[in-house]
Amino acid sequence: MSRKYFGTDGIRGRTNQWPMTAELAMKVGMAAGTHFLRGQHRHRVVIGKDTRLSGYMVENALVAGFTAVGMDVVQFGPIPTPAVAMLAHSMRADLGVMISASHNPYFDNGIKLFGPDGYKLSDEDELRIEALLEQDIALAASKDIGRARRVEDARGRYIHAVKSSFPADLRLDGLKIVVDCANGAAYQVAPSALWELGATVVAVGVSPNGTNVNDGCGSTAPMLCQETVVSSGADIGIALDGDADRLIVVDEKGQIVDGDQIMALIASNFARAGMLRGGGLVATVMSNLGLERHLAGQGIGLERTRVGDRYVLERMRQGGFNVGGEQSGHMILSDYATTGDGTVAALQVLAALVRAGIPASELLHQFDPVPQLLKNVRFAGGKPLEHDEVKRVIAQAEKELDGAGRLVIRPSGTEPVIRVMAEGDSADQVRDVVDRICAAVEKVAA
């Protein structure tokens, strides 16, 4: 059954345009609430959001939908995505909802759903909810309509949980840390957690106004963090995205450290401490070949999945892994969280920095990435990758890179674009391979 509403990370779109309208949000509340009405207990859903202006509209529509089918609602206000996952489980809720479009601009929004175990919903659950969206949904009897209330200490509960992931024998005294919260959901909790652990905190991206989330700040625009680290003489910088499930680090020289280097550091440290499970870590097809070679040199495996943190987590759960993530900065440490958590991952990096006693630039440069190039090719329709000439060019490129590089070609899941990525020891060869494949796709897609 094909998906109509759910993508790889919930429902997402431009607000006040289908499907991200108040009408559909209310119907999602009714459908998801109905799907999770199981048993005779009083059912409960918890809802968090980031700082987008449209969050008010989407939240109220969801509350109307959930209460209409008999679910009680607990509202947290602005709080990171991983906090919703954690609190859904700890508060014995039947369902958790995060209202966010993650790293997207303010005019987009989204609805992410978590089950009572704190994990994102399975494909089966999402498809059943989609089916309900196409039906007339039975409403609760008047006496059974749900109630809604706000919990004011949700952020404090999350800060406590985040701090518990940091080694009890360490403190952050003496470290000056820049934290860029992208004017998003972590604008209060991330600086507070770092300060409570002893750090001198320089906080930026902590003045949300409804329309400035991810705007020139955060993990997808780390220039602000880079500039602030250098100008303030900080030891390290931490950049989160709008819903704080993504992390990019900046060293004391202002250099960006991506998710591959962060995963290499955490996995290596876990392995040395005997904490690494599953025999390695899980990353996506986009992680650099240099990471794979670096880990192999330490006897640490790397398993790859398709792009999307949900697929990383799925493989982690199947194989018993406790470290996974994406080059883009999604970090999943399943000992501490059921979904990506940028703040928890940052604390693991900071713990390593304290223990090593060396500059961040030395600690965080775990390996030399091999040359990697990604280009996008737009097409009007059809299936360019199934054309014989495109197949021939791709096969030739794979033969040339065999043993010396890697090729990843995939259609985008959100737009009519073919993504062509190659990496290898020779930058010239990588560029030539990508250009030839893109030219072949453009020719047949014209």
Image (spheres, rainbow, N blue to C red):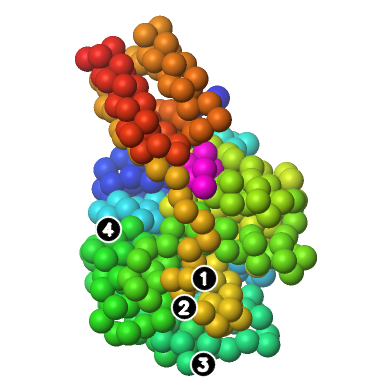
Give the structural element (helix, strand or loop) at label 1: helix
Q: Is residue 376 above or below residue 66?
A: above
Residue 229 lies, in percent from the top left, at: 32, 78
Using the image as rendered, state which of residue 306 and residue 413 is in the foreground: 306
Please give the residue where the numbered disc 3 appears in the rendered image.
Answer: 173
- Figure check: 315 above or below 367: above
Numbered marks: total: 4
The front one of 127 and 426 is: 426
Q: Distance of mark 3 from mark 2, alpha carbons?
A: 15 Å
**Mark 3 falls on what kind of element?**
loop
Mark 1 and mark 3 lie on one chain; the one further toward the N terminus is 3
CA gap between label 4 and label 3 equals 35 Å
Q: Is residue 361 visible?
A: yes
| Residue at which label 1 appears | 363
Q: Is residue 115 visible?
A: no
Element at badge 4? Answer: loop
Q: Give amino acid for label 2.
A: Pro
Residue at 39% in and 51% down: 110
Looking at the image, is mark 4 or mark 2 earlier in the sequence? 4
Instruction: Name the amino acid, label 1.
Output: Leu
Q: Which mark is residue 313?
A: none
Per the model, the C-alpha gap separating discs 1 and 3 is 18 Å
Q: What is the spatial separation of the Cα atoms under label 1 and label 2, in whole angstroms?
A: 6 Å
Point out the stretch of residues depicted in magenta: 284-290
Residue found at the very far right of the displayed protein: 274
State the image quarter where residue 167 is shown: bottom right
